Amino acid sequence: MLLPVGASAQWPEAKPGVYLSAFLDRQSLGESENSVELRPILGSVSAGYWVRPGIGIELEAGVGLADDSLGSLDLDFESQLGINLRLESLPVSRFAAYALFGYVRSSYDVSVGGSSSSITLPGGRLSLGMTYLINPFLRIEAGLTHHDYDGDTRVNSFRFGLRYDLDS
Amino acid sequence: MNTRISAVFYFVACLLTLSVTACDSDGDAQRLSNLVSIADAGFTSLVINGDTDTIIETGGTTQLSLEAFSDGAVLGTAISAASADWSSADTLIAEVDSDTGAVTGGSVDGTVAITARFGNLTATTRVRISSAELTSIIIEPADAAFTVNECSDTQFVALGVFQGEAEQRDITDSVVWSVAQTGATFDEIGLLRVTSSDVLTVSATRVADEEKPEVTQSEEVTVQDGLESIEIVADAGTLANGSPLQYRAVPMYANLPDERSEITDNVEWTLPPGASELFAVVDNTLPDKGLVTPSQAGNGVLSAACLGTNISESLNIVAEGSGEFADLVIEAQNSAREFPLQVIWRREEIAEQLVAAALFRDREGFEDVTNDNDTQWSISSSSNNVFSIGNDNDDKGELVINGEGTVTVLVTFTDDDGNFFSATATIVSAAP
């Protein structure tokens, strides 16, 4: 899926060098057997390095921008740290597909009936999405992420942001 | 330059990975999902084992249960014990599996507090561990009567009497239940399913092991011979290809007109072999007794019988299909005559014309399909060989009788959509 197919690439593929990203993540957080969801929003930045064309390693850090509540439960998204392996295809007609295999640690502050506690969720995640090249340096990026945590917690998210390739 | 940057990234990545994997947050994910459930349902309190204290033998085990309640609610909602965190105040007296809520008695007698934490809710119960010897067992029917009805089920309870203790303990789940006669069976938790018998001898036994002797108790149970009839009723819904339907058996007792508790699990369910192979099967095993699953459109006779008695009931059931055909019945030429059809044998050959009547979805009333090419007539069973039925173009459905006896005739019809229907009818030939 991530290999170039069909038409020849109009833009150069990702090549060794540093890239920076800034994006928003809207999470859908709930219990696996219950359709009720909390939807906090996270703002993140990441820095990555293309170790080979189409293969990058990136570190990211984010903070909560918008909290959510359900009944007496208030969920504050505190922060998120992560590391990802990025696989990205050659762009075709300015579009490229990408996959992120990552490991993240998300921290929440949960308040119920006046008493609050911190919850940390470490786990793997998989993102699939598309990028669109605005110019050789700048791309718009959007994708869906599934987080894999222990227990019955279900977390998916939609990510939208910009990426800047310093060495393109 | 690039090599240096790459090395920095690898170093930081490794540090982050180590810090992430080293972080022990087991249970946080479960706690968060519990909090979401609690907030969604509005739970405000938690109760363990119905808020009753528990007593177990030294070394014995018991599974604790959880219920959550909203403010003012009388009925609670069962919560999976595995969703909660469990802890024991004294592990010498009893240990509790922190993930499952299973309590195991320790080596010391005493009472210990067991606490469950579910999200932000907590509950505590008391569990007493006792090494007192079981000296005898008391068997009690749940309804305090040692009389049961044919084809019914009755819950029995075993109470343990322990040395030096005034309080009896419910040991229903830990004894072995048995019944001496063949007219009944026990399940593992003391539910007696009776078919038919005059008197039953039921026993509850605490099986011996290396440390404990066997303790057993038996009681006689009288089976009331009062089942008059069975009514078959279907759950709401439609029996159609791909849509199973649950049928239930409801008893009518001569001496207990108000006792209408269903006996679905205690009767024998059958569909005639010919029909069941062709359009549907009925489940005759627990816990799905009486569940009819059609594989195509068709009809057949569903029966529920109380084994050991001659009480049974039959019901013609029809599985709908996508075709135009809906039902098939056998009638006498004079449709006012009822089945089983009575024929008077006067020592001369008799020809009795039978009629196959089909109901089509898009037309009103039954139509005669006796001579249709898709209609097949045959003898299903007969008491002797004095009967024959025509299946050729000029004698389809003509039953020839040459003596006294009973015959069951089978007619089948397949419509253009492949829907198969069958019907049977019984004819009795007797001298005047």
Image (spheres, coloured by chain):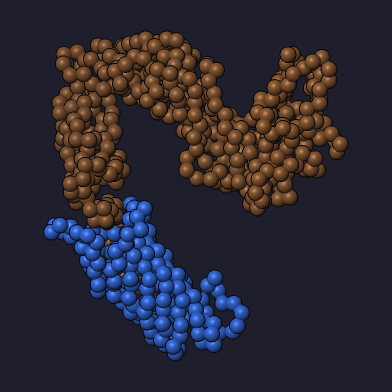
Chain colours: A blue, B brown
* Left or right: B308 as drawn, with respect to B18: right
* Left or right: A65 as drawn, with respect to B17: left
* Left or right: B425 as drawn, with respect to B44: right
User: Is residue B88 visible to us here?
Assistant: no
> Could you tell me residue B291's position as x and y percent?
52, 36
* Left or right: B244 as drawn, with respect to A114: right
A9, above or below B232, in the image: below
Quarter-of-image position of residue B58: top left
Of residue A71 and residue B410, the one placed in the foreground of this image is B410
A162, above or below B368, in the image: below
Of residue B411 and residue B185, the one placed in the foreground of this image is B411
Quarter-of-image position of residue B373: top right
> Could you tell me residue B228's position as x and y percent?
48, 20
Question: Residue at 68% across / 46% down in the picture?
Answer: B419
Looking at the rendered image, the quarter that the N terminus of chain A falls into is: bottom right
Quarter-of-image position of residue B176: top left
User: Is residue B135 visible to us here?
Assistant: yes
